[in-house]
Amino acid sequence: MDPTNSVAQSVEQIPSGMFLVTAAHDGRRSGVLSRWVQRCSDRPNMITIAMPKGLPVEPLIRDSRCFALCQISADDVLLQRKFAQVPERSDDPFESMAVDTAPSGSPIVKRAMSYLDCELVSHLEFESEFRLYVGLVHHAEVLHHTAPAIYYGTNGFSA
């Protein structure tokens, strides 16, 4: 058995949910789908997100020092399609959507299952195409009780 293939197959067994990572700063808003979100502490409540470098949402997270995670339900095809492509830097992907604003200023999609409003406490850069962001959860709310989108064997990012 090929050890590389065995590692890939084993790692693919780790489940991941689908989240819309959002941020806003200085009148600009952006968002991107991520499947690589994980709780990393419960005292205090903190989460991590792995995202590819160079996304339009990154400077907004960096400059505002905040972001939000909107959890997407399994049957929400609209959000999955709308954010399947990375928006242009000048586009506001929330323009035609029903959104609220979290206390941090990040957009919250009203059709999301829940949201976490986070303060950026750290980001780590590795010798890879991804950065790891760590957020301290300040506010959260369950918006709808539905089944979450859960994936196995995906690359963690929709582009």
Image (tube, rainbow, N blue to C red):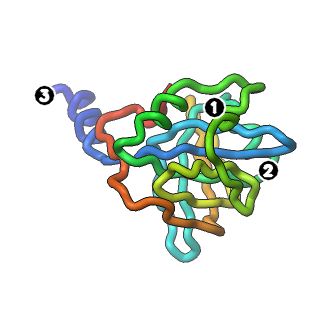
- The amino acid marked with disc number 1 is Lys
Q: Are marks 2 and 1 in contact (CB under 8 Å)?
A: no
Question: Helix, strand, or loop for circle 1?
Answer: loop
Mark 2 vs 1, N-terminal side: 1
Is 23 rendered above or below residue 78?
below
Where residue 79 sits in the image (x, y, percent)? 49, 37
Mark 3 vs 2, N-terminal side: 3
Where residue 141 sits in the image (x, y, percent)? 55, 66
Q: Nearer the viewer, mark 2 or mark 1?
A: 2
Mark pair 2, 1: CA separation: 17 Å
Q: Which residue is mark 3?
A: 1
Is 29 rendered above or below residue 112?
above
Q: Are marks 3 and 2 in contact (CB under 8 Å)?
A: no
Question: Helix, strand, or loop for circle 2?
Answer: helix
Where residue 75 sits in the image (x, y, percent)? 35, 42
Q: Nearer the viewer, mark 1 or mark 3?
A: 1
Q: Which residue is mark 2?
A: 64
- The amino acid marked with disc number 2 is Ser
What residue appears at the point 58 percent right and 74 percent down from the top-left corner?
A: 44
Question: Helix, strand, or loop for circle 3?
Answer: loop
- The disc placed on residue 53 is 1
Mark pair 1, 3: CA separation: 34 Å
Closer-to-camera residue (147/17)? 147
Is 81 rendered above or below residue 62?
above
